Image: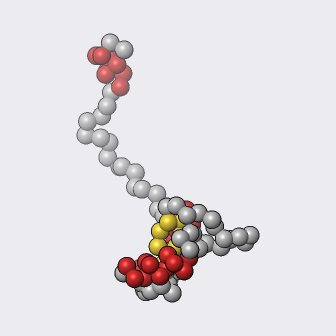
């Protein structure tokens, strides 16, 4: 809700709220609303469960919670129309 977004933005001062071992992140661009307990795990959409994160730290937190994403599946079937680059070069005169 917009009221939660306004509260979180004001509380976090319009910058990433991620704190590392040395300091808090200073990023003010590419900010995203991060659920501390993810919505997929039952986390509520309240200002106490949402913080601002820059894109990099939001992705980092998601990997910490859910693990690394699976790589995309490789196509098992060859293309229906294989591209013969050598033939294309000969036909175009290159």
> With 85 as the anchor, is 25 left or right in this view?
right
Residue 84 visible, this angle: yes
User: Can you say whether 93 is above or below 33 in the image?
Assistant: above
Q: Position of residue 5 (x, y in %)?
A: 43, 78
Q: Which residue is rendered at x = 71% and y = 70% of the image? A: 23
Residue 76: x %, y % from top left: 35, 49
How far across and how far down the image is residue 47, in percent?
A: 48, 85
> What is the tally of numbered marks visible in this picture?
0
Question: In the image as oriented, which residue stretches furthest toward the left?
Answer: 80
User: Residue lying furthest top in this view?
Assistant: 93
Which residue is drawn at the image coordinates 52% and 61% (left, top)?
A: 29
Q: Is residue 87 left or right of residue 45?
A: left
Towards the viewer: 68 or 31:
31
Side of 77 where 39 appears, left or right: right
Please say whether residue 55 is visible from this viewpoint: no
Q: Position of residue 83 (x, y in %)?
A: 31, 31
Query: Looking at the figure, which quarter contains the N terminus?
Result: bottom left
Question: For the C terminus, which image quadrant?
Answer: top left
Residue at image position (37%, 79%) is: 2
Q: What's the residue at 42%, 82% (across, down)?
A: 4
Q: Nearest the camera: 35 or 84?
A: 35
Q: How is the image coloured?
A: secondary structure
Q: Where is residue 13, by image quadrant?
A: bottom right
Q: Nearer the viewer, residue 41 or 13?
A: 13
């Amino acid at each position: 809700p917009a009221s939660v977004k306004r509260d979180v933005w004001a509380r976090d001062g319009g910058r990433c709220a991620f704190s590392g071992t040395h300091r808090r992140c200073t990023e003010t661009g590419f900010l995203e609303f991060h659920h501390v307990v993810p919505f997929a795990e039952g986390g509520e959409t309240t200002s106490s469960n949402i913080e601002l994160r820059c894109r990099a730290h939001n992705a980092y937190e998601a990997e910490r919670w859910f693990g690394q994403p699976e790589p995309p599946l490789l196509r098992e079937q060859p293309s229906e129309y294989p591209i013969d680059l050598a033939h294309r070069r000969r036909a175009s005169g290159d």
